Image (spheres, rainbow, N blue to C red):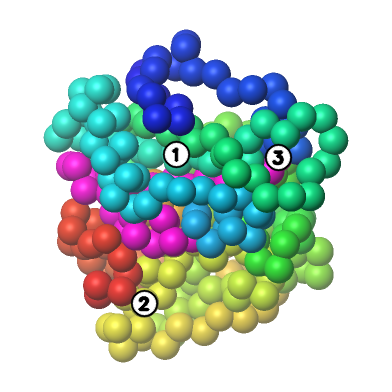
Amino acid sequence: MMMYVDGELVSGEQAKVSVFDHGYMYGLGLFETFRVYNGHPFLLDDHFRRLQEGLHMLGIEWEMNRQDMSRVIDQLINANQYQDQDVYVRWNVSAGDKGLGLYTGQYTEPVTVVYTKSLPEQMGREKQGVILKTRRNTPETKVRLKSHHYLNNIMAKREIGSDPSVEGIFLTEDGYLAEGIVSNLFWVKNSIVYTPSIETGILNGITRQFVIKMFEDSGYIVNAGKYPKEELYEADEVFVTNSIQEVVSLTSIDRHTYDSKQTITRELQQRYKLYSKKLWSKSEL
């Protein structure tokens, strides 16, 4: 696999970062994952904006723009011969080398690493949900960033095991519904859409924001708030979202099952597919 490391395309075996990089030493860095559909990086503008804003919060001065990102993606697709394929992209920015010890100044030499891999055009559309015993940790900043601090997610994944057809659902320390291990959570009751609010400490996912806007533009009511897990047991439909898996319906949570028709979820999946090859931002809806 060819990768991008700070201005160069190198093989995975040749890729290196400093052991003094504060992304490695202290977890100071952010990443975005998104999907490229036949050469089109879906919602790239939104991913770029979130990454840029998050890095600013961390005091990391990152000079690339959206056009730079698009150019690097094209280079990697060509170098890895991923033309005419769907592609997974992980765009990683770490703080850079500042030696031993906690650093309080601006990071002016961050390290950008970009990973890619090919994806099947059609991924799994259904999963089983499990309420996790592991609770969602609280964000380390005012809002949750997509940071290198992934221990909470890893411990949750260990709890449910490696089965890709199962998604664990976090509760907050207060017992409210939060999010999936790698996804945002939605459910439908009487044609009204519900989702945990960002006040629960969840990541405000790019796909979450896009889905909310699609629903609202279509006339659906979307309620975001703090909800107990019992809300899921009484729902008509439940689904999770992320930028790689898109929209995935949950057929059951614990011992509670849902109507296999999942009418609103299916409608959403179809609309999502229509937009995925052409939109740069949710603002284009």
Coordinates of residue 95 in the picture (x, y in percent): 63, 41
Residue that carries the numbered disc 1 in the rendered image: 90
Q: Amino acid at mark 1?
A: Arg
Residue that carries the numbered disc 3 in the rendered image: 27
Which residue is at 74% across, 50% downward? 105
Dot 2 alpha-carbon crowd within 10 angstroms: few under 14, some 14 to 19, many 20 or more: some
Of residues 253 and 226, the one drawn nearer to the viewer in this rendering: 226
| Residue 131 can be seen in this image | no
Going from the N terminus, do you reach mark 2 or mark 3 first? 3
Q: Which mark is residue 213?
A: 2
Going from the N terminus, do you reach mark 1 or mark 3 first? 3
Which residue is at 41% across, 55% downward? 48
Residue lying at the far top of the rendered structure: 13
Residue 41 falls inside the magenta stretch: yes
Tell me the CA gap for discs 2 and 1.
24 Å
| Closer to the eye: label 2 or 3 | 3
Tell me the CA gap for discs 2 and 3.
32 Å
Relative horizontal placement of residue 68, taking residue 173 as reference (left or right): left
Tell me the quarter of the image containing the N terminus.
top left
Disc 1 to disc 3: CB gap under 8 Å: no
Boundaries of the magenta span: 27-50
Of residues 81 and 59, the one drawn nearer to the viewer in this rendering: 59
Relative horizontal placement of residue 179, taking residue 208 as reference (left or right): right
Relative horizontal placement of residue 270, taking residue 98 as reference (left or right): left
Q: Amino acid at mark 2?
A: Lys
